[in-house]
Amino acid sequence: MSAAEIVDWVNSIIWSKGLIYLCLGAGLFFSILTRFVQVRQMKEMVRLLIKGTSSEQGISSFQALAVSLSGRVGVGNIAGVAAAIGFGGPGAVFWMWLVAFLGASTAYVESTLGQIYKVEYQGQYRGGPAFYFDRGLGQRWLGIVFAIAAIISCGLFLPGIQANAVGKAFTQITGEGTIIFGDIGLFKLVALAVIVSLLAIIIFGGIKRIARFAEFVVPFMAAGYILMAVIIVIANIHELPGVIKLIFEDAFSPMAGLGAAIGWGVKRGVYSNEAGQGTGPHAAAAAEVQHPAQQGFVQAFSIYVDTLFVCSATAFMILITGMYNVQGTLEAGQFIVQNVGATVEIGSPAFTQMAVSTMFGNFGQIFVALAVFFFAFTTIVAYYYIAETNITYLSYITKSPSLLFVVKCFIILSVSYGVLSATGYIWGIGDIGVGLMAWINIVGIIVTYFIWKPTIKALKDYEAQQKAGVTEYTFDPIKLGIKNATFWEEKLKNKQK
């Protein structure tokens, strides 16, 4: 059994229909329970983004949004959307939208949990699924399992995907250059040196440096990318009605089969926006806020930015220019729809680069390569922070020395392998990591709801204060019947002194 076959077999188990239904079902479940908070509190989401402040221990709401978006907005928004269309057909885009809309409520729940059960440790706020499974659910073993899964996924598996896409986008413009050894050329080694050097500078600077970097880079890269898409759509505006019609028609009568459309749409949707995956709560817990629900609102908004804005930008560019193929269950090299060469790799930035090039020529190729670089690089930085937080959790509960230096070395090695690797199954390795964390996190937050209902209590408490017109929000977990939220208990005591 080859490595690729083993990866495919593991993926077929983790990414069975069960996980797809779990992602959609959890989003619908929490949407109903919160009375579609992702719609009702839209105005409050925007207000909190503008108002947030930081502290010595925590970062601002906007910085937390930027850090979480740096994880959400990555290669999945460019190469992942292309893969969803290429394997699932245009209808997969609809299912990405649906999982984003429903997933925004899941993002509210998991990020609010991250805030409720965060701790102050070694001068920084720390939190995430490992912490809320331990402190909120009372199941330390589950916290340890999630922490190990997150460290392996975010420290080893997922960074390689981002780095691999950078290498491919870079060499699609420059070519491989002089072959140095094997099939690795000079220009790929240049790309490797740049990304590893920058990564080392950022990750050895801690969460404050990560937050400042993300706060500066993420808004500009997302805005620039969306602007490029808007220009292409306007230039082809006569095609837009047909593209929208194609997406909705193919969602329910898909050319690649309904299972393929839903499966690829949900898989790439979850991979891109990370709702339910358990990655967002790490940055959410680091924010300085008056009330846990506030960061839940901000993180729910991040799902819209990721999927409804950035992923949609990619999808419309590809579909409106016709720069895509659709491969179903046919033999390799045969396509249901073939608009570009059969050798163009579906799970890469190639479709997007070709779409932009139809209007901007070689500049389009360069622009997408730069977008891939910044999207991927910021995502790698976010993955490091997640791995770091979970290493810190293990250190926190065992009172043992931290192994952060080891994690930093591992993530640099993973990035190096990802840039240089030519293996076609690297996306499959990443999917294993995503699916593993999603299974643990979604099941865990659903169980937490049925036992304590902390996020619903927090939402009702916040909306009651909102209705009363308070100028400064407070959070009293004991009054609400929420146990083990010791950070907030101490904060309230100190405020009342």
Image (cartoon, helix red, strand yellow):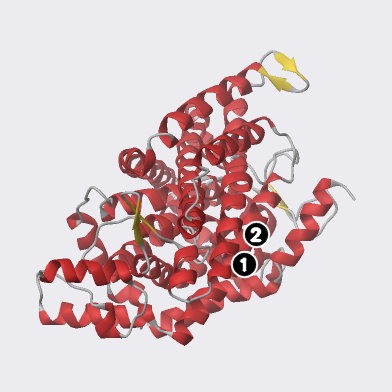
Q: Is residue 71 above or below residue 13?
A: above
Q: Is residue 292 visible?
A: yes
Residue sitting nearer the eye, 273 or 146: 146
Q: Are marks 2 and 1 in contact (CB under 8 Å)?
A: yes
Quadrant for the C terminus in the image? bottom left
Q: Which residue is mark 2?
A: 89
Would residue 454 be found to the left or right of residue 134 on screen?
A: left
* Marking on residue 336: none
Q: Where's residue 480, x and y in %?
A: 28, 84
Residue for badge 1: 250
Q: Is residue 333 visible in the rendered structure shown here?
A: no
Residue located 74% across and 42% down the image? 424
- Mark 1 is surrounded, within 10 Å at the Cα level, by few (under 14), some (14 to 19) or many (20 or more) other residues, namely many
User: SS for tag 2?
Assistant: loop
Please determine whether, in this image, residue 145 is positioned above or below residue 484.
above
Q: Is 206 situated above or below 114?
A: above
User: What's the residue type where badge 2 is placed?
Assistant: Gly
Left or right of 426? Residue 63 is: left
Extreme-front residue of the structure: 399
Three-letter code for the amino acid on which mark 1 is drawn: Asp
Sooner in the amino-acid sequence: mark 2 or mark 1:
2
Q: Which quarter of the picture shows residue 490?
A: bottom left
For the residue pair 344 and 104, the one nearer the viewer reads as 104
